[in-house]
Image: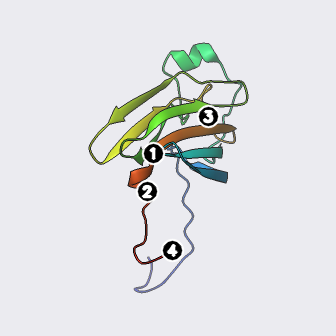
Amino acid sequence: NIQAYASKPLSLHFETTAQFSTVTELEREIKVCHWGGVVFSETYNLRHSGAKLKDVFSRVDYERMQRGSSFEYMSAKLPANSYGIDYRDDIGNISTSNVRKSRKYVLFEMRPRFPLFGGWHVVFNLYYTVPIYQLVGAVTGSS
C-alpha cells in the first residue's frame, strides 16, 4: 500500500520505431539573379538520432519490408512556383525524388541514396529557384 500523496521514483523503458531527424548543420546561400530568379543553395547534414541499428545492415532484409526505424523519404515545402529543383550528394545527382505543385507551395519529396538508421547521417544539397517577383520588391520613396 502507498499512502495518499506519497511519491516514488518511476523508471519507464519503451521501444519505438519513430524516426528522429536532427539537422546538425545547415548552410543556405541565396543569390539574387538579374535574369529574374532568386537561387537557393542549401546544404544539410542530417542525422537520424533514433534507436541505433542492432545488427549489420542487409539490403535484402530491408527490401523484404524489415525496415525498422529507418527513413524512407523526406519532404520539403518550397515556395510556390519554385523551379529548377535539384537534389545531390557528394556522389552526384539523386534521381529518386518527386515534385508536386499546389497553389500555396511546391512539395518536394526526396528519397536518400541509402536508408538512414539510428546513428547514421547523410549530407545532401538542395537547389531551387524562385521567381524574383515573389521575394524582391522596391521600397517606395527610397533611392
Spatial distance from mark 4 to mark 2, Cα to Cα?
19 Å
Residue 8 visible? The answer is yes
Question: What is the residue that sits farthest to the left in this orientation?
Answer: 103
Spatial distance from mark 3 to mark 2, Cα to Cα?
34 Å
Check disc 3 and report the residue beneath it. Answer: 116
Amino acid at dot 2: Leu
Amino acid at dot 3: Leu
Q: Please tell me whether residue 5 is drawn above or below residue 67 in the rendered image.
A: below
Check disc 2 and report the residue beneath it. Answer: 135
Q: Please tell me whether residue 3 is drawn above or below residue 52 in the rendered image.
A: below
Q: Which quadrant does the N terminus fall into?
A: bottom left
Check disc 1 and report the residue beneath it. Answer: 130
Q: Residue 30: percent from the left, percent from the top?
A: 59, 52
Marks 2/1 in contact by CB < 8 Å: the verdict is yes
Q: Earlier in the sequence, mark 1 or mark 4?
A: 1
Amino acid at dot 1: Val
The quadrant in which residue 57 appears is: top right
